[in-house]
Image (spheres, helix red, strand yellow):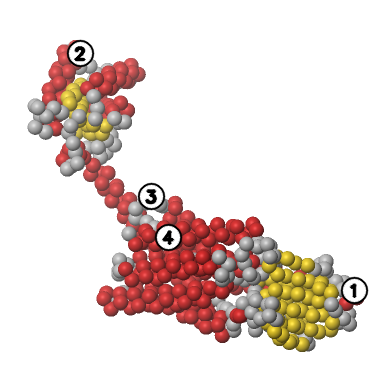
Amino acid sequence: MLKKIVQYTYFLFLALFAILMGYVMLTFSLSTEGRETRSGYELLKDYSLSMTEDADAPVGVRQIYTWTISDVKDAYQMLIFYTKHQNVYVYIGEECIYRVEPDPKNLFGRTPGGVWNQVPLAESDNGKQIRVELVPVYESSADTVPDFYFGTKYDVVVGVFCRSIPSGVFGIAAILTGLAFIGFVLYNYKNTEIDKTLGMLGIFSIMLGLWKVTDAEALRFFFPGQIQMAMLSCVTLLLVSVPFLLFIKEQQNNRDSVIWYIPCFTSLAEMLVVLVLQLTDRMDFRQTLILTHLQLLFLVVVCVGMVAWEVHVSGWNAKIKKSVCCMGLCFVGLLADLALYYATDGKSMVILALCGFLIYILVQGISSMKEAKQLMAIGMRARSFERMAYHDQLTGLYNRTAYAASIGDENFDPERCIVVVFDLNDLKKCNDTLGHEKGDLYIRESARIIQNIFGEAGECYRMGGDEFSVLLKNGSLSRCKQMVEKLKAQVKRFNDGSKDVFMQIACGYEMYDKRIDYDIGDTARRADKMMYHEKFTMKQQNGGGEIR
């Protein structure tokens, strides 16, 4: 029950965040101004920096960078720098030539997010003073000093992309791996041997990959000044805990412990708080990031504690050792990334956690897929054995064992049940005269006709040799009589087209009557009497039967 509550609530938040991100994608905009694009590449360090108080600024401070423009060639070149959660104003003299800030018409969103600012400079600007004013939106970005590049956009883009390749590759690999796991689960969804929580590992992998990809600076060149990327990075990180926990708990023997659900519910509660704060414009996703980091640390504590408990109760085995090694890589990487993030005020974050989690995803996911395939193979063999036990190999119909199991089932209700019995006339004579191959043909074709007529209304059985039976539930004798007439018509059509085997199927049927039948067996015996009467009549009419 708890598992379903967590899953449904998680998917509800997933849908709400998807709607929110869709709305932001469609409506959020920045107010920007700048010169035309143009095309030098060096890191500028000869600027002067001053920090001034500004009562109108979000955190009461404004960073001002100034230097003198020089070495601008005939071709256009650019001042390029990356800002994160900072409004940007660039002046030459007193003229504002470039500006980036959130559009005041936005419903919510106080930050422009991560922006690659590209300020064109002309040869006529040589000797003039340029001033860059940055207004931090959050306290965490108040001391952030960007790198200023002077050069062509192409050279800067290449350099940034080269730095972003490792995290981008790992992020895309995580997304593709997650999609593969979800595809595997959906393809085999009806198979009961499949562990459906592998889909949760897939969701976790996709969210993890999206977090790293959308957090990459290089992506901002494709989406310049788009807050959506910064928001998506926070949202996907917010959504990683629950699917990871739902998967990892299923790998443990103590999976039914309620302790596993405590971090799930705290994560869902965090989602609710964060969503409300964002929608009411109290705090942006970026400002609530510390809650997500604390939730991740709580997840680490619970997982380590539960695995330690399992080791204490069950001892070490190969599965636990593999799980501990993989989780160790994940958690050590996560702690290292968080420590570096806070030590550098959010300016740096390596990919140790992503590498560790990707290794965990691949090892555990592939292991789960192998186990699932083994279980499917076992299940197929079991179903094959079951089919052999309850089906007649020659005709494919149910056999006598299946008939006994059906009428012996505690849920079997004989009321309004009709028993139809069949006997193939002169089967032994067909075998002796034409051979067993023709005799088998006689049996198969008779079974096919019986199944065609009665299969949709009831269950057909080959009771052995030349005897067949059908159980019709909730039927009527008049309807049964009509089906018997259709059977006779199909037998006639078979005989008209047959060159050797002559088919005769004697039939009898009776409905259960509690006044005279003790059980369904008495009904079957009454149907037998009717069938033998018809069998005798057929033999009399055909002079003992005919084979041609």
Q: Amino acid at mark 4?
A: Thr
Q: Residue at x 27, y 19 (%)?
A: 482
Q: Label 2, label 1: how many angstroms apart (C-alpha)?
A: 112 Å
Instruction: Return the disc, 3 or 2, that comes first in the chain's sequence.
Output: 3
Q: Is residue 494 above or below residue 89?
A: above
Residue 9, which numbered label? 4
Q: Could you tell me how many numbered marks the image carries? A: 4
Q: Residue at x 59, y 57 (%)?
A: 22
Quarter containing the C terminus: top left
Q: Is residue 99 visible?
A: yes
Q: Is residue 179 above or below residue 269?
A: above
Q: Position of residue 374 (x, y in %)?
A: 35, 58
Q: Label 3, label 2: how many angstroms apart (C-alpha)?
A: 52 Å
Residue that carries the numbered disc 3 in the rendered image: 190
Instruction: Return the disc, 4 or 3, that comes first in the chain's sequence.
Output: 4
Instruction: Specify few, some or many for label 3: CA neighbours under 10 Å numbering under 14, 14-19, or 20 or more.
Output: few
Q: Residue at x 41, y 70 (%)?
A: 266
Residue that carries the numbered disc 1 in the rendered image: 74
Instruction: Return the disc, 4 or 2, that comes first in the chain's sequence.
Output: 4
Q: Label 4, label 2: how many angstroms apart (C-alpha)?
A: 73 Å
Q: Determine the secondary structure under disc 1.
A: loop
Residue that carries the numbered disc 2 in the rendered image: 542
